[in-house]
Image (tube, rainbow, N blue to C red):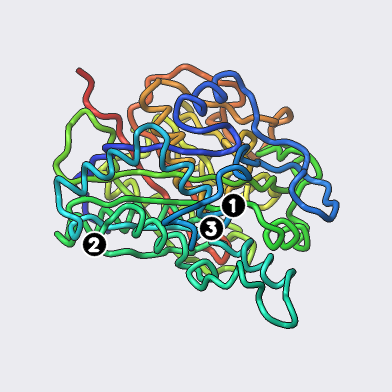
Amino acid sequence: MPAPIRPVSITAHTATSALGRGLRAHLEALRARHSGLRANDFTAVALECAIGRVDGLEQAALRDEHALFECRNNRLAWLGIQQDDFLAQVRAAIARHGADRVALLAATSTSSIGATEEAYARLDGGRIAHDLRRPPVHTPHSLGIFLEQALGTRGPCLTTATACSSSAKIFAKAERMIRLGVVDAAVLVGVDSLCGSVLFGFNALELVAPQACRPFDVRRCGISIGEAAGFALLERDASPSAPQLIGWGESSDAHHMSTPHPQGLGARLALQGALERAGLAADAVDYINLHGTATPKNDEVEAAVVADSFAARTRASSSKGWTGHTLGAAGILEAVICLIALQHGFVPGTLNCEQLDPLCGPQLALGNESADVRVALSNSFGFGGSNCTLAFARGARA
């Protein structure tokens, strides 16, 4: 049984997604029930689906000292890190703790594969075109290498790629590193951008819905893919007014390459681990941001786990009807949505769910609700049975 952990302060956070740039844009879109999903206008070859696309990326090319890392994914990271004064707060943390005491933990499922797709599409006499002969871009570690150079961190720099749990798992890594004294702070980064491999790959698996996704609706038929960049700064012994990471749970059930365990074994283990490390019973949880992809099996299994495990008063919802499924960035984007819920006493409903699947319990919130949210969980379940649940608490209020 995991022992309770000492909470870690989240001293800064931000996100950029199809809902907009920064915390205010996300709060306003959630409150207005305004989805960022739109008809696919990304792929040159027609593909009927909805996507969550970040506006303005095409005009945000990396230049000068960052030009070596130019690609859509790193461009999105650089655009996103400049929201909510996050970049300045990271540099201040580096000054406080020392560059070698600040970790950089990156998470992505596809990294800069879009640039590699372009390189193969534009082969020149069997060779990569000259402007794409930039080895740091064509690696799964491109995101971390780029941001380490841009930020000046000198602590551990790691890339996590565990599909859709990637940027949830980096919260657990950060807590362990801080608790063990390896570092005093950690910059968490989760970024995934749209690319053909992902859109056509998921479509080949028959997992992409032709319209905007409908989490937990009886008519759900697949995901809508989005892109996002999410960031968090975790520090030891920071202000008690900051929100806190109070628990995490991880599991790997390895039931199937793309289908969850039918009884939700891995999800239950991750949930149990998060509650035990937080030292909480399930009835202390006020809100759960569900993985809620809108695929038939994922929602069926997750709905059963929630209905079995939580009191009727606990509110739960999926935010993927707003942002789409942002894959490797989903964990940190949805963690940020949990932090918004904690700060503003606000539970976002489950957008696009009109006919609730009867498998769902009373916890599922369809419409937006005001609530005193003190403890929130976030579920992230990836292909291959890679599962992670995070537990957050509201900071002390003045």
Tag count in the figure? 3
Q: Who is closer to the viewer here, 152 or 192?
A: 152
The CA span between labels 2 and 1 is: 26 Å
Q: Decide which of tag 3 and tag 1 comes sooner along the chain.
A: 3
The label on residue 155 is 2
The residue wearing badge 1 is 193
Is the C-beta separation of discs 2 and 1 under 8 Å?
no
Q: Who is closer to the viewer here, 20 or 50?
A: 20
Disc 2 marks which amino acid? Gly
Q: Who's the residue at 37% across and 39% down the image?
A: 282
Determine whether the residue tagged by mark 2 lies in a helix, strand or loop: loop
Please identify the quadrant where the N terminus is shown: bottom left
**Which of the two discs, 3 and 1, sits closer to the camera?**
3
Q: Is residue 224 above or below residue 286?
A: below
| Mark 2 closeness class: few <14, some 14–19, many ≥20 residues within 10 Å | many
Q: Quadrant of residue 200?
A: bottom right
Determine whether the residue tagged by mark 1 lies in a helix, strand or loop: loop
Disc 3 marks which amino acid? Glu
The label on residue 70 is 3
Residue 361 in picture, x, y percent from top left: 57, 34
Q: Is residue 289 above or below residue 286?
A: below
Residue 62 shows in the view: yes
Q: Decide which of tag 2 and tag 1 comes sooner along the chain.
A: 2
The CA span between labels 3 and 2 is: 24 Å
> Taking 138 as reference, is 232 left or right?
left
